[in-house]
Amino acid sequence: MIKEILQNIEVSMKQLADINKALDETLIVAVTDRRGVITFVNQKFCEISKYSRDELLGQTHRIINSGYHPKEFFSDMWRTIGSGKVWRGEIRNRAKDGSYYWVDTTIVPCLDENGRPYQYVSFRIDITQRKLAEEHLRRMDRIEVAGQLASSIAHEIRNPLAAIQWSLRSLSDDPDERRRQVDLILSELERLDQTVGELLLLSRPRDAKFGQQDVRRLLDMVVTLMNIQARKHGVQIVADIAADLPEIRCEQNHLKQVFINLIKNAMEAMPNGGRIFVRAQRHGEDHVLIEVQDEGCGIPPEQLPKLGEPFFTTKEKGTGLGLMVCYKIIQDHKGKLTIQSEVDKGTTVQVLLPVA
Ligand SMILES: Nc1ncnc2c1ncn2[C@@H]1O[C@H](COP(=O)(O)OP(=O)(O)OP(=O)(O)O)[C@@H](O)[C@H]1O
Ligand SMILES: [Mg+2]
């Protein structure tokens, strides 16, 4: 009887040892006390971090911190495991030789009889290869987007160039006809200039000079500027800008360009006149919400996904770059741009910007 039990225990011990060995081969394991001081690491931990066991014991995980994750990332992790819950996430660490590695990490708190963690056991899997592959894909994606953009730009520039070339070749001797041709050439040149101007705005984020700015003043300037054109088109701009708006951090000229583009679109949507409402108010603790609303033709639902695509335009003289530039600039400001529209009712563009 006793012999049998002992035999069983031996088998179980052997099984445990096998499982332990298998885990040890695949998992990076560490144990820390409740303050995060490392009390145990397995061989894999030493291999991947390139530190010896002696160098690791008694340290905290700060020794392999890569500085990649924000403080909140780790304070969130500590809050979770400190309350006795399991935490899981992907962490970038820094090995002793300065190289980086990514680990999929699970941290399990061990609880005492009062339900309080007295130590933490962490299991990690090396996911560096997967992370590198993802990064590679993202970069390929960007190259592809750049390629697409380049080919549509080439197309967009070649059309007016062809028109100019053709007009110059066939300049008439008749003065009236000649004037008409020159006008055409000038208007094509103007369109080219506009396209190139908007593209430059996109390609020069390095020129950006960010500073604190009063939203109210910025919008006042834009509205004053656009009012001149608006009146000519029988359009009235109604501004409702809260007086106590906080300052935002922005590149003034770029942001002005956004609201000029939006008001221009609103104006062009109302060829027979109407009203444009420009509103600005605080949104929660740390955002400012700016709206440009028109009573124009609206946008059919099937066209909504196309907005912001380069060169998508329904206008004879449009470049189709206005909204794309807006999206890009708002993104650079860590803000959000959304468009709601109903055919024959009008369009509302909302811009959410973080306060300084
Ligand atoms: N307020 C709006 N009302 C109705 N349609 C709009 C509005 N804003 C944008 N659109 C639609 O989205 C398209 C793309 O706008 P976007 O500003 O990017 O280019 P565009 O106005 O055509 O040309 P550009 O701005 O270069 O003069 C427009 O052609 C139009 O069809
Ligand atoms: Mg436009």
Image: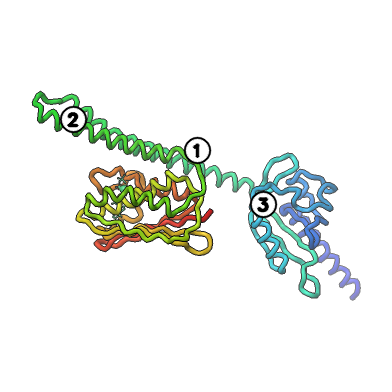
**Which residue does the image show at 51% across and 46% down from the upper left?**
211
Q: Amino acid at mark 1?
A: Arg
Q: Amino acid at mark 2?
A: Val
**Which residue does the image show at 36% across and 47% down from the upper left?**
309
Quadrant in the picture for residue 177: top left
**Which residue does the image show at 80% across and 75% down from the upper left?**
113
Q: Residue 166: where, in percent of width, then height?
A: 19, 28
From the viewer's perspective, is the residue at label 2 or at label 3 nearer?
2
Question: Is 190 situated above or below 248?
Answer: above
In the image shown, does 101 or 351 lie closer to the viewer? 351
Quadrant in the picture for residue 170: top left
Q: Residue 282: where, in percent of width, then height?
A: 47, 62
Q: Secondary structure at mark 2?
A: helix
**Which residue does the image show at 79% across and 59% down from the upper left?**
32
Task: Determine whether, in the image, residue 216 is placed left or right of residue 265.
Answer: right
| Residue placed under numbered mark 1 in the picture | 206
Residue 155, can we see it? Answer: no
Sequence-first tag of 2 and 3: 3
Q: Secondary structure at mark 3?
A: strand
| Residue placed under numbered mark 2 in the picture | 182
Q: Which mark is residue 103?
A: 3
Beta carbon at label 1 within 8 Å of ligand 1: no
In the image shown, does 345 or 85 lie closer to the viewer? 345
Query: How many angstroms separate mark 1 from mark 3 (CA)?
Result: 34 Å
Query: How many angstroms separate mark 2 from mark 3 (CA)?
Result: 66 Å
Q: Residue 246: where, in percent of width, then height?
A: 50, 57
Instruction: Answer few, some or many: residues within 10 Å of disc 2's Cα (few below 14, many 20 plus, some between 14 and 19).
Output: some
